[in-house]
Image (spheres, rainbow, N blue to C red):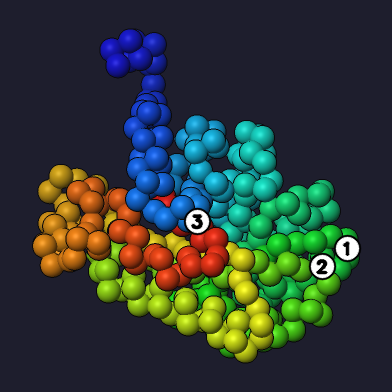
Amino acid sequence: MNEILKQNKTAFYVFDVKTLKDRVAYLRKMLPEDVAICYAIKANTFITAELENDVDRFEICSPGEAEICDLLDIPDKMMVISGVYKTPEVMENMVANGKCDRIFTVESLTQFNLFRELSEKYKKKISLLLRLTNGSQFGINSDEIEEIISKRNEFEYLDILGIQFFSGTQKTSLKKLKREIDKLDNLLILLKEKYDYTAEELEYGTGFPAAYFKEDTIMRLLQSRKSRLSSDEALPQSAVNTTRISLIKSATKGRTTFLLTAE
């Protein structure tokens, strides 16, 4: 560190890449084998290149983040173009220039119609994840998802891979996580039974809490919860780490689930 300080006269960042990779390896160890990891690069764009061989995908929420991934030669198949900021110009540029190996999330019916129009205009297959709203302004509701799924055969160039869900961060309640997973399971079961649709993927942003300071009350809250959990549900010592497998198994059975993590 002293050498680094001597070489740099202005402010700079220092990242411990080994610690980073160890954390990803720990997550993989704690999660079921069929759960993949998607890193939201808005958490820290500087470590994107270091994570390319450790995570399965990158979540990209802005044109700037997409440009960073392009400059780093991140494969298109590793990119999930997410978020509400999808201007027609930027999306058309991606589709027109052969960026269709990327997956795109649908945050509104307007976005869905945009992708439908672009896929028909360029006659290119576009893969989509439909974002289920949690009651906020983000995403579409379950009735709208049902309508899209019921008409999916009319969209020749759209491949609806599955569902995306994210309801916020700093969650300390395992009961809330379980309620969300039950909700997702029920929706996927309904789509299968009513429309014979099987989602290939479920992208679930768990929103696990992070303790930013040693005295953080979140850590104390988690530790108090830990004493009331069964051994199969217990939280690890670190507040950033994942819950045990039992809370995720039901939603991943028979499907590939991508866990959003932003550490």
Question: Type of residue at label 2?
Answer: Tyr
Which residue has dot 3 on it?
Answer: 34
Q: What is the secondary structure assignment of the residue under circle 3? A: loop
Question: Type of residue at label 3?
Answer: Asp
Residue 40, given in percent of the width and then of the height, sits at 49, 50
Name the residue: 57% across, 51% down.
Answer: 60
Name the residue: 66% across, 86% down.
Answer: 195
Look at discs 3 and 2 and give the one toward the viewer.
Answer: 3
Q: Residues within 10 Å of mark 3 (few under 14, many from 20)?
A: some
Which residue has dot 1 on it?
Answer: 123
Quarter in which the N terminus is drawn: top left
Location of residue 196 (image quadrant):
bottom right
Judge from the rendering whether residue 27 lies leftward or rightward of residue 84; answer left or right: left
Location of residue 200 (image quadrant):
bottom right
Q: What is the secondary structure assignment of the residue under circle 1? A: loop
Q: Verify CB contact (< 8 Å) between mark 3 and mark 1.
A: no
Question: Type of residue at label 1?
Answer: Lys
Which residue has dot 2 on it?
Answer: 157
**Real-space Cα distance between discs 3 and 1?**
32 Å
**Real-space Cα distance between discs 1 and 2?**
7 Å
In the foreground, 61 or 39: 39
Q: Verify CB contact (< 8 Å) between mark 1 and mark 2.
A: yes
Name the residue: 79% across, 79% down.
Answer: 153
Look at discs 3 and 1 and give the one toward the viewer.
Answer: 3
Sequence-first tag of 3 and 2: 3
The label number, if any, that marks residue 134 in the structure image: none
